[in-house]
Image: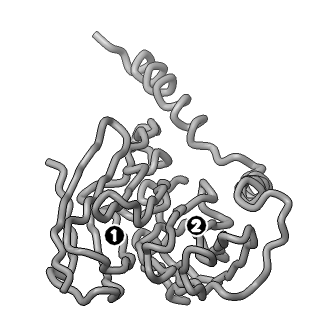
Amino acid sequence: MTTRRQFLIVSAALAAPAAARAQLDPNLAANRKAAFQAALKRIVGDTKVARGRVKLTLPPLIDNGNSVPLSVSVESPMTEADHVKAIHVLTEKNPLPDVITFALGPRAGRASFATRVRLADTQTVTAIAQMSDGSFWSDGAEVVVTLSACLEEGLI
Amino acid sequence: MARAVVTVPPRAKRGEIVEIKTLAQHTMETGFRRTQTGDLIPRDIIRTFACTYNGVEVCRVELHPAIAANPLIAFTTVATESGALKFEWAGDNGYSVTEIAPIKVE
């Protein structure tokens, strides 16, 4: 038969690892910033990213971060000689900076796409377009998220 | 059962830019959520999506956990000739779905 003392010891032993795993990393903000910079560098290398030509559309106030409509369009003639090769979307405060990489070519007709994303926090979302001539253009959108994605269980 | 829905206009004029919408049924489990006992729920997402028009690639998409459940992808293509558009999704745990939609170009 299990005594009260034995039960307490066993239940404490079971609960301890879960509590330890549930701890948030104290360097969370710094790590996310570094991850964002690393993702940016992987996409653009050492090339300068210019503002403009890209239009990122997101609702400014988001009630539910689990499904946010996002669309990107880039000004480009989309010909064989001058087209958009890829559109990347990055976030600052999601657990992973990458959101979507959309590779396209002149057969797309227009350099635009739409999808639905998850956002973990109030943050700036960045869209970067890679042109066929090797240049990069970007646009950012600041969004306010009231109910975050990823937090259904109370943890990130 | 894995399902996907695509919306392609059945007919188009030559050279016209047509809009395509695709929706795949998938939970897109991020791999960051935990159960009530603190165990991580393993990641289960669609990783890639590609669209080809009569064998020519229109777009190729890499998806990450930050894409919402039941991923919607809407994009455009130029209607060049009659034929078929092929859509392919692939992801974790052997997820693989292919859809084909015909298009008639006048």
Front in this rendered view, residue A138 or A134? A134
Residue A66: percent from left, percent from top: 42, 68
Which callout, 2 or 1, points to the residue nearer the camera?
2
| Depicted B100 relative to depicted B10: above or below | above
Q: Nearer the viewer, residue A151 or B84?
A: B84
Q: Disc count in the image?
A: 2
The C terminus of chain B appears in which quarter of the rendering? bottom left
Q: What residue sits right under mark 2 in the picture?
A: A86
* Image point (40%, 21%), residue name: A7
Image side of residue A74 versus residue A42, left or right: left
Q: Chain of mark 1?
A: B
The Cα–Cα distance between marks 2 and 1, rounded to whole angstroms, is 18 Å
Task: Answer yes or no: are tags 2 and 1 on the same subunit.
Answer: no
Where residue B28 appears, x then y in whole percent? 36, 54
Task: Name, please, the residue furthest toward the top.
Answer: A1
The amino acid sitting under disc 1 is: Leu
What residue does disc 1 label? B72
Q: Quadrant of residue A46?
A: bottom right
Q: Closer to the camera, B6 or A99?
A: B6
At label 2, counting other C-alpha atoms closer than 10 Å, the crowd grade (few under 14, some 14-19, many 20 or more) is many
